[in-house]
Amino acid sequence: MNKLLPTSTAGSLPKPSWLAQPETLWSPWKLQGEELIEGKQDALRVVLHDQQSSGIDIVSDGEQTRQHFVTTFIENLGGVDFEQRETVRIRDRYDASVPTVVGAVSRQRPVFVEDAKFLRAQTDRPIKWALPGPMTMIDTLYDNHYKSREKLAWEFAKILNQEAKELEAAGVDIIQFDEPAFNVFFDEVNDWGIAALEKAAEGLKCETAVHICYGYGIKANTDWKKSLGAEWRQYESVFPKLQKSTIDMISLECQHSRVPMDLIELLRGKKVMVGAIDVATDTIETPEEVAEILRKALQFVDADKLYPCTNCGMAPLSRSVARGKLTALSAGAAIVRSEISR
Ligand SMILES: [Zn+2]
């Protein structure tokens, strides 16, 4: 992008209440069949409009076409039985009933490619598409087939690569892999997590990103954050490896987080999507609060590599709060843009 400090969001945006129960994760659809397909497309157009009218430069589908950022992708794969459920600990934090891997996993059909083509046809702005990362995918399943987290992650990486290549061909400019699990399983990240991520992104000519956050603003996550102490140094063990990786951009949580900003220095040379919007509160940031985070980040990332963003997805928020936050993000980025172009 030629524009300095291009803004974007980490991923999801709230769904309209006629499509799904608002302010809820895993919210069931309210429509069915053809009406659901049309409803998802209408919702995509609405969130696209919201992003463009609030001045967001790199736009997305706001995940209107999926129920959940991980589950919806897995639902379209072979080898996973959604009827056979087991309770597992997700990211070492909360228990959830999850589907079981019962055989070799495979991609039966393109998952988001038609949705990406639809988005591409609606806008001339650069578009970013989010996919779950391999490590985060295995963490939401019970594996009764491979019996190896590494092997299963590797198979998912190959599947993600097939999907990513078709998304690229559909005109997606940035493919982002969501890896909140990178903030939890540090040994695995080092042993095979980065390699699996690179496999998922292998051969892509569009830009690639990885989003690592402290999760949606749900209770299990906010309780976990309270237990992390005064300084959150989780990124410290992952960044040096990411800095050497083939991934182009790293998306981080910075607003109201206790992550020491100087950890960004460990990513020097990479593009950094700096989370300047807190998704765990309904309070809308002032443009000045957004600007303050960006100014701090500028001490550790070159201006042409700084991408103002949200901390995480905004699906659990109300639509009006999310719109307010999008506007604050643009306005805050504009303040800093004018300061550095002086
Ligand atoms: Zn996130």
Image: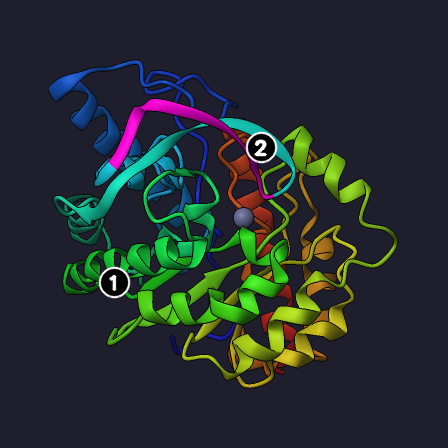
Please say if 14 is above or below 28.
below
The stretch of residues the image draws in magenta is: 80-91
Within-10-Å neighbours for mark 2: few <14, some 14–19, many 20+:
some
Please say if 324 is above or below 268.
above
Q: Which x, y percent locates residue 142?
A: 42, 36
Quadrant of res 203: bottom left
Is residue 84 located in the magenta-colored stretch of the structure? Answer: yes
The kind of secondary structure element at disc 1 is helix
Tag 2: residue type? Val
Tell me the number on the disc at residue 161.
1
Tell me the number on the disc at residue 99.
none
Tag 1: residue type? Asn
Left or right position of 107 against 320? left
Q: Which x, y percent locates residue 91?
A: 59, 43
One can see residue 56 in this view: no
Please say if 23 is above or below 207.
above
Quadrant of res 233: bottom right
| Main SS, magenta residues | strand
Pick the front one: 51 or 26: 26
Please say if 31 is above or below 254.
above
Please report the residue visible at 36 percent of the width from the left and 40 percent of the height from the top. 63
